[in-house]
Amino acid sequence: MIHDSLPELKGRVAVDCFTGLLVDYARRIGAGVLVRGLRAVSDFEYEFQMTMMNRHLCPEVETVFLMAGEQHFYTSSRLVKEVATFGGDVTSFVPPEVLARFRKRLKRPRRV
C-alpha cells in the first residue's frame, strides 16, 4: 500500500518489515539515521525515551525528528479508524490508493 501511495518515488524508496529491535535492523541494513515523526508534545516524551535507549544500544545510529504539519498534528491512525468505523469521512486522511482496502476492512463502511 505504501508503494501504491507513492508512485512518484518508485525505485527511490524501499519498504520493508522486521521483528526485533529497530537498532538491530538499522545495523543490519547499514542505516545511520532513524527518522521519526512527532505530532503533539506527548509524542516527544515517548520518542525521546526510545531515542535514549537506542543511543545506549547503538550509539552510531542517530535519530532525527520531523514535526507533523498542522493539518495532521492531532491525527492518529486510531482516531481515523474510529471515525471511519462510525461512518465519518476520512478521505482527507487516507491516500486514495489505500481507501478501497481500508473500506473492505471496516465492518460497517459508510461514507469513508
Image (tube, rainbow, N blue to C red):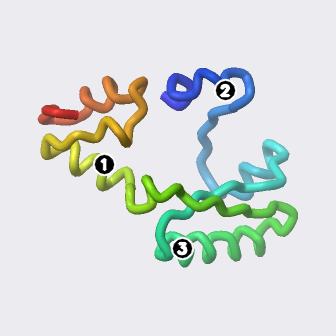
Nearer to me, 86 or 61: 86
Q: Earlier in the sequence, mark 3 or mark 2?
A: 2
Q: Secondary structure at mark 3?
A: helix
Q: Secondary structure at mark 2?
A: helix
Which residue shows up at 54% across the image and 78% down it? 45
Residue 80 placement, left or right of 48:
left
Amino acid marked by disc 3:
Tyr
Where in the figure is residue 63, as x and y percent of width and height? 74, 63
Q: Secondary structure at mark 1?
A: helix
Q: Which residue is mark 1?
A: 80
Amino acid marked by disc 1:
Val
Q: Which residue is mark 3?
A: 46
Residue 64 placement, left or right of 112:
right
Say whether marks 3 and 2 touch (CB < 8 Å).
no
Answer with the quarter of the image where residue 38 lies.
bottom right
The answer to whether 2 is drawn above or below residue 66 in the figure is above
Amino acid marked by disc 2:
Leu
Q: Which residue is mark 2?
A: 9
Q: Residues within 10 Å of mark 3 (few under 14, many from 20)?
A: few
Where in the figure is residue 50, as x and y percent of width and height? 62, 70
Answer with the quarter of the image where residue 13 lies.
top right
Q: Which mark is residue 52?
A: none
Where in the figure is residue 72, as x and y percent of width and height? 44, 54
Which residue shows up at 77% across the image and 71% down it? 55
Q: Earlier in the sequence, mark 2 or mark 1?
A: 2
Which residue shows up at 25% across the image and 26% down it? 104
As measured in the structure, the alpha-carbon distance from the residue carrying label 3 to the one carrying label 1 is: 21 Å
The answer to whether 46 is drawn above or below residue 71 in the figure is below
